[in-house]
Image (cartoon, grey):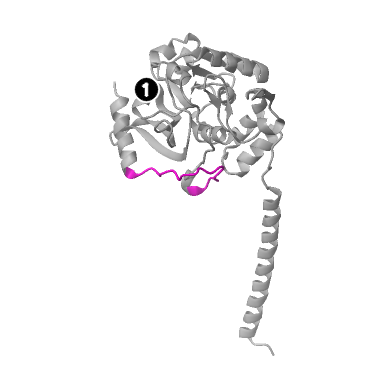
Amino acid sequence: MIGRPTIYLLGGLVLGVVTAVAVYIQSRRTQSILGSLKLIANPTSQKDLVFNLVHRGLVRSHRIEEVLLAIDRKNYVPPVFDDKPLSIQQIYSDSAQGLSHNATISAPHIHGLMLDLLEPHVKRGGVVVDVGCGSGYVTACLATLVGESGRVIGIDHEPDLITLASSNVSRGNPDLLPRIRFTVGDALDISIESILGISEYNDQMDGSGVDAIMVGAAADSIKALGSLLRLLRPGGGMMVPVGPPGGFHKILLITRHEKVVDGEEFKVVNYGTVRFVPLQTRQEQANADVFSAPVKVMNIDGGNRVVIKSLLNPAPDMTPDDYRQMREDLRRYTSG
């Protein structure tokens, strides 16, 4: 006769075997799924490109994934490089492409990352500013996000680039043109009055500013962003790289609190380290050397986002003193 302890023992062994088998099966399924998600080495379509961005962890928002699928990069990159037509692999490569006037269209992983982080502030029916609109690619993405009732203001200080951006949107996504206003302007010297001067957007703005700002060039300091930050309405957000020309730049999300919190009107969070062309005046940009070396996305959300390309030198992290100085600069240069 089998005693009760023996029955318990046999039952435990059976349960252990069943559990082990279940874990093994789940593990094999997981390996199978992960195996099917191998990155596409040489993307030849926008779908391939977006697939890679999503599975690298750079794009997490389904909303941004859908937008990137809708705005095809091939309509916004220059068709010729070094007097040769771009190949399909070059069009969809994860690298920046040069435009005229020492400007660039950023690499797809930069577009994906920055749009993904700014997305919560880009509301349907809202007003958004794209600073340094260049090719018009990000402008088109933002216009898709805000919907038919929203508005996007694309700003660049080079008239030829404004013409290029408008032409690219006309060719690639003409349905977005009614919700976009391209204008020549200097982002380093802009005011809420000048933006409000675009009368067709007054109803959405209601005199209180814009919902979101995307900056496609690196400011050398918070001080340089004072006029732009004053455009943000409470609850608004701005994505901007900040750092010295030719050096490393922090990808910052700066948000304006709905109400002042502990004496602070703005919050700043660093989401990575890259290198950008600098935010300059028109004359400075005309005389500048374009930085086109590979970039690295680092320290994103505690390392949860995946590194894309390596830099020869490691980029320093933000220190508590860095954040403290930025908070002081935000108070100093956004008042008044």
Mark 1: which secondary structure?
loop
The quadrant the N terminus occupies is bottom right
Q: Position of residue 250 (x, y in %)?
A: 43, 37
Residue 72 appears in the picture as rendered: no
Q: Which residues are magenta?
A: 303-320
Residue drawn at x 71%, y 34% as measured from the top left:
44
Left or right of 22? Residue 107 is left
Disc 1 crowd rating (10 Å Cα; few below 14, some 14-19, many 20+) is some
Q: Amino acid at mark 1?
A: Arg
Task: Name the residue that disc number 1 marks.
Answer: 230
6 in relation to 110, above or below: below
Residue drawn at x 64%, y 36% as measured from the top left:
50
Q: Position of residue 280 (x, y in %)?
A: 43, 22
Name of the residue lying farthest toward the front: 82
What number of labels is visible? 1
Residue drawn at x 55%, y 26% as measured from the top left:
104
Name the image quarter holding residue 81.
top right
228 in relation to 252, above or below: above
Left or right of 53? Residue 259 is left
Q: Is 304 within the magenta?
A: yes
68 in relation to 282, above or below: below
Residue 136 appears in the picture as rendered: yes
